Image (cartoon, helix red, strand yellow):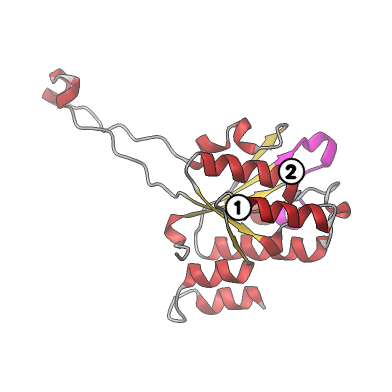
């Protein structure tokens, strides 16, 4: 099973200014998060971000925040470790659009009226962030419970210790999440060197 760009959303979890200095391999992790954000922007993949207790941990790293804002993405402030507890699922899964009721249709019984049109569903969530064993893990597990497909970008995730990061990956894989890398995501979204954005995305990865 390969990722389909048209079915994906990118979720970036808690790359915050007062947290990142304590994160194992933080420079590489942040660099890959930036690559993911730029590729999502180039390929028009919707993007979301979260910030855990921003009053205490600060806001997203400035370069990443600039990309998030430029992409028109929204940032969810949260206090729960799982972003799902603070309303993430409602954002990822848009409500049905009600069909307009006009003319004689207004007098029809409800069961004869035109049904609501399902909004476009993007049920594959590509997720990366910190800390892998806390906020990212709890968010990903709850997304799986909500029947999303979850793809964890391992080289854009970390924790304060390598042991905790790796324990998170083991648990996520055991619960049905797919473990991928930044380049795996980018090239699966592209699928072909004939893609009109291939050269642009390739330059972002180098």
> Could you say which is closer to the camera, residue 56 or residue 102?
56
Q: Is residue 17 magenta?
A: no
| Residue 132 at x, y percent in the picture | 73, 51
> Could you say which is closer to the camera, residue 175 or residue 132?
175
Q: Does the magenta stretch include residue 55?
A: yes
Of mark 2 and mark 1, the one earlier in the sequence is: 2
Image marks 2 and 1: residues in contact by CB distance under 8 Å: no
Can residue 187 be seen here? The reply is yes
Please identify the quadrant where the C terminus is shown: bottom right
| Residue 170 at x, y percent in the picture | 68, 55
Indicate whether 26 appears above or below 104: below
Please identify the quadrant where the N terminus is shown: bottom left
- Which residue shows up at 63% across the image and 62% down it? 36
Q: What element carries label 2?
A: helix
Can residue 158 be seen here? The reply is no
Look at mark 1 in the image and give the residue it sits on.
174
Q: Quadrant of residue 28?
A: bottom right
- Which residue shows up at 47% across the image and 81% down it? 193
Q: Left or right of 52: which side holds 146?
A: left
The residue range painted magenta reads: 51-65
Q: Left or right of 102: which side holds 19?
A: right
Q: Is mark 1 on a helix, strand or loop?
A: helix
Indicate whether 43 appears above or below 177: below
- Which residue shows up at 83% across the image and 49% down it? 17
Q: Left or right of 28: which side holds 188?
A: left
> Could you say which is closer to the camera, residue 63 or residue 6?
6
| Residue 70 at x, y percent in the picture | 62, 54
| Residue 159 at x, y percent in the picture | 80, 52
Look at mark 2 in the image and give the residue it sits on.
134
**Label 2 to label 1: alpha-carbon separation:** 16 Å
């Amino acid at each position: 099973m390969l990722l389909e760009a048209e079915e994906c959303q990118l979720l970036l979890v808690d790359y915050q200014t007062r947290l990142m200095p304590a994160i194992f391999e933080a420079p590489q992790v942040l660099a890959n998060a930036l690559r993911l954000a730029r590729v999502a922007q180039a390929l028009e993949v919707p993007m979301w971000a979260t910030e855990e207790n921003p009053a205490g941990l600060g806001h997203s790293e400035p370069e990443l925040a600039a990309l998030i804002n430029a992409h028109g993405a929204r940032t969810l402030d949260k206090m729960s470790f799982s972003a799902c507890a603070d309303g993430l699922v409602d954002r990822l899964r848009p409500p049905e659009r009600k069909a307009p009721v006009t003319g004689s249709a207004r007098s029809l019984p409800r069961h004869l009226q035109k049904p609501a049109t399902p909004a476009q569903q993007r049920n594959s969530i590509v997720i990366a962030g910190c800390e892998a064993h806390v906020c990212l893990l709890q968010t990903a597990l709850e997304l799986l419970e909500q029947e999303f497909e979850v793809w964890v970008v391992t080289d854009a995730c970390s924790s304060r210790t390598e042991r905790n990061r790796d324990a998170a990956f083991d648990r996520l894989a055991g619960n049905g999440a797919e473990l991928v890398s930044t380049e795996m995501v980018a090239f699966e979204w592209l699928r072909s060197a004939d893609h009109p954005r291939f050269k642009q995305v390739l330059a972002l990865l180098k």
